[in-house]
Image (tube, rainbow, N blue to C red):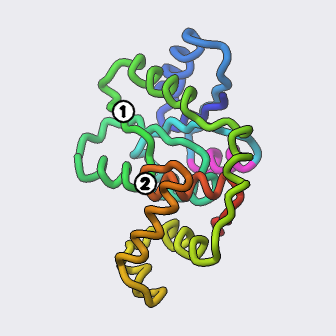
Amino acid sequence: MNILIYDDHEFVTEAIESYFLKQSHEIKLVRKHNVSDTLAYLHDNDVEIIISDLLSDEDVGFSLFEQVFHLYPHIKIIVYTSVTNEFIKDMLLEMGVTEIINKKEPLNSLWNSVQTLCQNITLPTKKTNTKLVKLTKKEIEIALLLAKGLSAKEIADLLSSSVNTINNQKNNLLDKFGCTNSTELIVKLAQSGLITLL
């Protein structure tokens, strides 16, 4: 399991790395302290999980997360932050962040979250079953519009269809791929090569 830890404060990444390595030597950890280095590393290396602060001297993490979800939809992001604003937390979860852990919590909470993720991450061998399923042209169209964050009503307007029809087709896709929400669906379709996110 490859994990990238991003925080502009080096002592935070050092503390996480030290604690994690005491728990297990079966994970590979890399620490990054700015956005450009983080994106460069992701371009050249396989990473399954990112542990990231939300606020840094460079930027608010939203732009980094958007780029990660766009370019590497299989990566899971755990936000490790001192931000407690419920509206911001809701926005992060809607964006696709897997979990938000407060920095006031013990590192054990972060470790437990990583362990749970490691157990639940889909192995590449499971993709073969999904590849056997074919999408219709309409399903691909709807999936790509969902990936852009459009609502059922917006998609219905674009495709000259009813909201009920779009919702039915979306629900059929969720059932077909065993997903509980649109974000999970898009990630699974992209991982399986059934849609391409440009």
Quadrant location of the C terminus in the rendered image:
bottom right
Which is nearer the eye, 188 or 3?
A: 188
Q: Please state the horizontal and vertical placement of residue 92, each as a whole percent of the image.
A: 37, 50
Q: Residues within 10 Å of mark 1 (few under 14, many from 20)?
A: many
Looking at the image, which residue sits at the far top?
A: 22
**Which stretch appears magenta?**
35-43
Query: In the rendered image, is residue 164 in sight?
Result: yes
Give the residue type at disc 1.
Answer: Ile
**Residue drawn 23% across and 47% down?**
86
Image quadrant in which you'd find residue 103: top left
Q: Please state the horizontal and vertical placement of residue 114, each as a whole percent of the image.
A: 50, 27
User: Disc 2 marks which residue?
Assistant: 181
User: Disc 1 marks which residue?
Assistant: 101
**Residue drawn 71% across and 58% down?**
193
**Residue drawn 72% across and 54% down?**
131
Sequence-earlier tag: 2 or 1 = 1
Q: Is residue 50 magenta?
A: no
Quadrant location of the N terminus in the rendered image:
top right
Q: Residues within 10 Å of mark 2 (few under 14, many from 20)?
A: few
Please give left or right for residue 112 compared with residue 131 in the image: left
Tell me if residue 72 comes above or below residue 139 in the rendering. above
Give the residue type at disc 2.
Answer: Asn
**Residue drawn 63% across and 52% down?**
72
Q: Please state the horizontal and vertical placement of residue 57, each as a whole percent of the image.
A: 44, 47
Tell me if residue 2 comes above or below residue 105 in the rendering. below
